[in-house]
Amino acid sequence: TKLRYLVNAQLPSGMKSWRGCGPGAMEFSSGGYRMVATTEFASAVDVLHVFKKDGPRGRKTRAQDSATAQRRYQEAAAEQANQQTKH
């Protein structure tokens, strides 16, 4: 249901910005899980990564999860650029 807010250009409660994935990247936390998504491209919401947060490790996100979100953001940016050059 939180994605519906993003699709309608509204900011749902519990969302915060996510560093390293462009100006439209957001993070949502729920029940020990995190979702990183962006609304930066076209008129869609791209879910970049969903992962389980390690409770005993504290608040810091694992480097692997950050790298996955960053890589998928770059892939989405490249795809968006390819679509723009075709039109």
Image: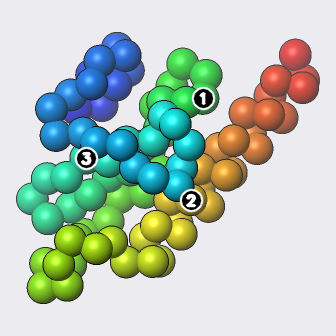
Q: Can you tell which quarter of the image residue 10 is in?
A: top left
Compared to residue 87, the image places residue 85 above or below, namely: below
Would residue 66 appear left or right of 84 to someone viewing this image? Answer: left
Q: How is the image coloured?
A: rainbow
Residue that extends furthest to the bottom in the rendered view of this protein = 56
Would residue 76 appear left or right of 60 to someone viewing this image? Answer: right
Label 2 element class: helix
For label 3, the crowd category at 10 Å Cα-Cα, with few meaning under 14, some 14 to 19 and many 20 or more, is some
Residue 45 seen: yes
Q: Which residue is mark 1?
A: 41
Counting from the top left corner in percent of width and height, residue 63 is at 45, 77
Residues under numbered marks 2 and 1 in contact, where contact means CB atoms less than 8 Å apart: no
Q: Which residue is mark 2?
A: 70
Label 1 element class: loop
Which amino acid type corresponds to the residue marked 1 in the rendered image? Phe
Counting from the top left corner in percent of width and height, residue 62 is at 37, 77
Instruction: Name the image quarter holding the C terminus.
Output: top right
Nearer the N terminus, badge 2 or badge 3? 3
Would residue 1 appear left or right of 23 to someone viewing this image? Answer: left
Instruction: Name the image quarter holding the N terminus.
Output: top left
Q: Which residue is mark 3?
A: 28
Disc 2 to disc 3, how far (Cα)? 16 Å
Residues under numbered marks 2 and 3 in contact, where contact means CB atoms less than 8 Å apart: no
Nearer the N terminus, badge 1 or badge 3? 3
* Disc number placed over residue 20 in the picture, else none: none
